[in-house]
Image (cartoon, rainbow, N blue to C red):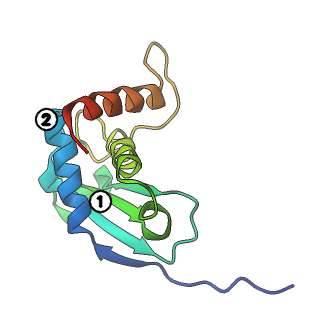
Amino acid sequence: MRKKKWVSVDWKHAPDIKKRVKILISSLDLSWLKSSDIYTFRSTTSSTRAYARIWGLSRVWQLALKTNPSYIVEVISQRFDKLPIKEQDKVLLHELAHIPKNFSGSLLPHTRSRGKRNFHDRVDELFAQYLKNIKY
């Protein structure tokens, strides 16, 4: 049996994704999202099946580093870049939907909680609203 060879993930800043995130935030009036504290990266050589991920800076790291809550949206180049533009925007919106309204550094899960809408239903609603506001 062969051992799996580990290849380190390569991350690069993604200003094109940052621009699209800003457009999503402004066109949907997601005013609680502070685009200045959302960073974007494109990764390559990742073995994940995901198209993108979001990373939050937890409270303990905020205290240790004496910094504000921040988030990183990472797109997985080998998967994300192959998608049509509309689907890429939906993926980005999905990641942004994980950010709670208090912009605390924590992340909202996919699971349904009592009395609240399903996470994916909320993403679908936001995406439908976005499609009405934007021309492709």
The residue carrying mark 1 is 61
**Picture residue at 47% right of the left edge, 78% below the top:** 9
Identity, as a three-letter code, of the amino acid under mark 1: Trp
Instruction: Report if residue 63 is visible in the image.
Output: no
Check residue 44 in the rendering and tell me which mark sits there, or answer none.
Answer: none
- Name, please, the residue furthest toward the front: 136
If you read the primary sequence from the N terminus, does the residue marked by circle 1 or circle 2 appear first?
Answer: 2
Q: Quadrant of residue 71?
A: bottom left
Does residue 34 lie above or below 61 as drawn? above
In depth, the one of 30 and 105 nearer the eye is 30
Does residue 16 lie above or below 124 as drawn? below
**Picture residue at 21% right of the left edge, 38% below the top:** 134
Task: For marks 1 and 2, give the one nearer the viewer.
Answer: 2
Cα gap from disc 1 to disc 2, whole angstroms: 24 Å
Identity, as a three-letter code, of the amino acid under mark 2: Ser
In depth, the one of 97 and 103 nearer the eye is 97
How busy is the neighbourhood of tag 2: few (under 14 within 10 Å), some, or many (20 plus)? few
Q: Quadrant of residue 14?
A: bottom left
Instruction: Report if residue 132 is visible in the image.
Output: yes
Residue 118 lies, in percent from the top left, at: 48, 24
- The kind of secondary structure element at disc 2 is loop
Residue 17 lies, in percent from the top left, at: 26, 60
**Picture residue at 43% right of the left edge, 56% below the top:** 53
Residue 36 lies, in percent from the top left, at: 12, 55
The residue carrying mark 2 is 31
